Amino acid sequence: MNACIARSLLQSLLALFLVAAAVQASDDTSALKHKRDDLSEADLRRVEAITVPVTDFSKAERYEAMSAGAGTSIAPNDQDSFTQFSANLAFEDEEGFKLGDALFEKLWVSSPSSTQASDGLGPLYNARSCLSCHPRDGRGGPPEGASDGTSMLYRLARAPRNDGERQMLATYDMANFPDPIYGAQLQDRAVPGLAAEGQMKMTYSELPVTLADGELVFLRKPTYAVRDLAYGALDPTTTLSPRVAPQMIGLGLIEAIHEADILSRADPDDADGDGISGRASLVRDRATGEIALGRFGWKAQTPTVRQQTADAFAADIGLSTPDLDRSFGDCTEGQTACLGLPTGVQARLGAVEAPDPVLGLVTFYSANLAVPARRKASFPKTLRGKEIFYQSGCASCHTPKYVTRRDAAHKAQAFQLIWPYSDFLLHDMGDGLADGQTVGIANGREWRAPPLWGIGLTKAVSGHTFLLHDGRARNFTEAILWHGGEGEKARDAFAALSTRDRRDLLAFLESL
């Protein structure tokens, strides 16, 4: 059997497996709650009334400017807009937030070190601190000009090789399988004496797009590769998925959205015929062992803020935590030099490099970063743009509002009217944005609809306007024009707008 036929057969088998997995995933949502169980009947009616889609665009909706309910930050709109704690955070919790902030900014060092509470970095890693990837708690970007690639990385995953591995995917025991040598992430940095795994290599070509009013827009089409691989070749089936670090605001509120409100928007078979077939991401919660709703990450592969934090400590920095005991980070069995280096585990501090309360404090900090208040929500231009946003079908995936659980784990997030502008479901975004990488039930064309709150402050906070999972879009217009698949109808509607209507829509996005 020649290589082309073998590859074609492998792709066909994988496609059949993904179809079967999608059917299984649909069945497995029965393990989740499809009806809100935290509200009285009176409260349920209130929530249903206030979250109904708006039809009157002549004025701002009640509380619309308060994007995160009582937790909304009204601090000045500047580079520190994403660093504020929730406005309704209790005074006694401010200490935990500030300690978490200090640990979020902490620079870790290699072992052994005289600063024993700070060692454990790597041995292979992408960043020395959480802040390195999320500067000022904002959005990362690709290497551009003088900036480096710290806030962007490659996720690595290969296809399942046998029935046993396919079964692990079907039962959510694995989201995918790492490269046998390089692991689940390309580590472009290493401690002294050890070679980094390699470096990202990216090139862009320009794709011209002419809008209905004659404006010519150029889209950057990226091509991704690796260079300077230090440990041999990647597995032939390993895929590269570039990811920029997302903004950090509002994470605790997203976790506090009742799963029933997200599941109610899923329509995997497009039963209503609107061309939108969002799917709920199902994952295995490491803490409980149960099937849970994934809602964090570019492919909604993570169920909680704490798990997301533990994953980042292990994969990005190379630190073990009580929830994920990986003192060698993403080092694999084939990287013997890496596994032979000392770890940062200190017996007097605990069995891991970042023991409690480190993980808990960083999780608390991450969950309580405030969402800034809207700007110009009631301005006529913004309201016209909002109406066009709805008319163009954007709100079909970017669901504007929710009321969080009354029984949320933390009081500051409980029973808040919030405006994240996402349904937190997986959507097929077409070939243009496809990365070819399966993550859990998400296939190579699917991405979670990212929340849009705070997106208008990207330039002020992060110093750039790069958008989408790999930062290829340089502005809102390019990001919208990259939409395909389920987003194609909205993309075409945007491209057909008059100059004034398009500017109004962009003004609305700037206000978020």
Image (spheres, rainbow, N blue to C red):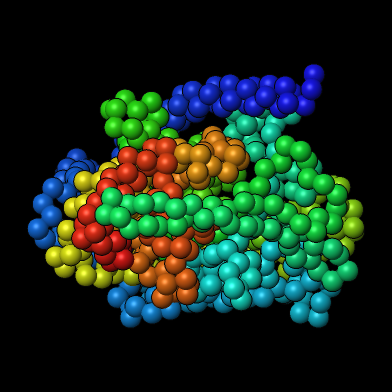
Viewer-closest of 425 and 85: 425
Image quarter of residue 269: top left
Which x, y percent locates residue 40?
22, 43
Q: Is residue 451 above or below residue 510?
A: above
Q: How many marks?
A: 0
Which x, y percent locates residue 436?
59, 39
Residue beneath the point at 64% across and 57% down: 202
Looking at the image, the residue that sits furthest to the top is 1
Residue beneath the point at 73% across and 26% down: 4
Quadrant (top left, top right, bottom left, bottom right) of the N terminus: top right
Image quarter of residue 72: bottom left
Quadrant (top left, top right, bottom left, bottom right) of the C terminus: bottom left
Looking at the image, the residue that sits furthest to the front is 214
Which x, y percent locates residue 343?
81, 64
Q: Is residue 302 shown to the viewer in this render?
A: yes
Q: Is residue 319 above or below residue 90?
A: above
Residue beneath the point at 64% across and 27% down: 11
Residue 357 in the figure: left or right of residue 189: left
Which x, y percent locates residue 132?
60, 71
